Image (tube, rainbow, N blue to C red):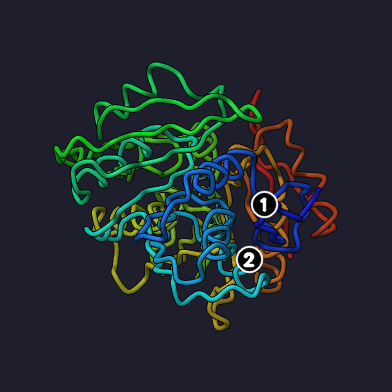
Amino acid sequence: MTTQFSVADIELELLRYPAEQQSNLQAWDAADEHLLKELIATAQAPLPTAIINDSFGALSCGLSRLHHDWPLYIETDARTSQLGTQQNHSRNHLTMDNLHWLTSRDPLPNHLSLVLMKLPKNLSYFAHQLTRLSQVLTPGCRILVAAKAKSINRALLDVFAQHLGPATASLAWKNTRVISCIFDGKPRPQPKEITWSIPEYQLKISNLSNVFAGNKLDIGARIMLANLPQGEFSSIVDLGCGNGVLGLRAAQLFPKADIHFIDDSDMAVASAKANWERNHLPPAQGHFYWDDCLTHLPADVQPDLVLCNPPFHQGEAITDHIAWQMFLDARRRLAPGGILHVVGNRHLAYHVKLQRLFKNCTTVASNGKFVILQAKK
Ligand SMILES: C[S@@+](CC[C@H](N)C(=O)[O-])C[C@H]1O[C@@H](n2cnc3c(N)ncnc32)[C@H](O)[C@@H]1O
């Protein structure tokens, strides 16, 4: 795995976040290189620019290297991406005075001259991002979106036309293309929120557009809900909470417990919080953190139960390094005797990891596809 990024005269050292991780994945891809190459070829002036979905800062570090005072508005839903971008600016001795940080829900500035985006995996989220842009951009503003060539088709160009304006794709380079869209000047309304229910548990749920599983209950979460542990718990973590469904059910089962919801996605944390309120759970007992695993969980929180339905991809990459980090963090933070309760696809073989880390692992339930595992500290 290389960490040396090189496009035209831009040389950077780029790492993913966290820098120490059990994966061989690179911090950028050819679409980042393609986008920077285009901007250099057209001698783009350093005007106010939004950078949206930059994985670990390849685009923002590249532009900061070209002009240290380029005004950059960096929008991301992922805490790991924000932390990675900051880490890579520091590693490359780049000033951060030119950077303005935005989450996926913060209002965008209305004086942008250019928008640079990476195509996210989730197309409903992408459509939502274009709609947000349509509410602030000035007519004629240029939006450049870099993506793998195989992800670009007629249907995607229609998403641009529907939500922002006409778009055309460049020639392919290293199996990537840059889509150029010109804003047609018509602001689009935000989609209406959809609320759905899980009747067996009397829960009402709503998800923002980038939240795992969309407007339905994940099948792994369903089997987890049917097999939550029994006992007395007073401090519970829903690690990788998504819409918060596991922690909400835990709050019903253990009404005296404090529940800590943690997710890398800002929209997930916001949805979990909204769902806590929607289901009339006690405000003082719900705690919400936009974080990378348990990195910044307050020192005085010592959970006796961690519930976890771990992710098995990061962006486009299929990986189990986040599951591994979640298990490590759970072992570090659980109270002695505390329990890590995990659901996973059978083929992911989480029992091997749990056995190695905790020196014990019990199978609580399983069906053809999923298994529920428990490890005790
Ligand atoms: C399989 S989903 C589970 C969502 C929810 N708990 C459920 O069961 O429906 C995994 C969740 O982990 C989150 N996640 C991914 N990387 C993370 C990280 N580094 N730290 C915290 N959460 C992360 C994802 O955003 C996603 O919401």
For mark 1, what is the residue? 27
Give the residue at the far bottom of this rendering.
300
Mark 2 surroundings within 10 Å by alpha-carbon count, few (fewer than 14), some (14 through 19), many (20 or more): many
Apparent side of residue 111 relative to residue 72 in the rendered image (left or right): left
Task: Out of 218 and 176, give the one closest to the viewer.
Answer: 176
What amino acid is found at the position of numbered circle 2 in the picture?
A: Asn
- Percent of width and height locating residue 283: 29, 69
Q: Earlier in the sequence, mark 2 or mark 1?
A: 1
- Percent of width and height locating residue 12: 69, 60
Instruction: Please report contact status of discs 2 and 1: CB closer than 8 Å, yes or no.
Output: yes
Q: Residue at x 32, y 43 (%)?
A: 129
From this view, report whether residue 227 is shown above or below residue 232: above
Q: Is residue 326 visible?
A: no
Mark 1 surroundings within 10 Å by alpha-carbon count, few (fewer than 14), some (14 through 19), many (20 or more): many
**How many dots with numbers?**
2
Quadrant housing the C terminus? bottom right
Q: Residue at x 60, y 62 (%)?
A: 84
For mark 2, what is the residue? 88
What amino acid is found at the position of numbered circle 1 in the picture?
A: Ala
- Percent of width and height locating residue 275: 30, 53
Q: Residue at x 25, y 41 (%)?
A: 131
Apparent side of residue 2 relative to residue 51 in the rendered image (left or right): right
Apparent side of residue 73 relative to residue 132 in the rendered image (left or right): right
Point out which mark residue 74 bears.
none
Task: Out of 239 and 249, give the one closest to the viewer.
Answer: 239
Task: Out of 67 and 274, give the one closest to the viewer.
Answer: 67
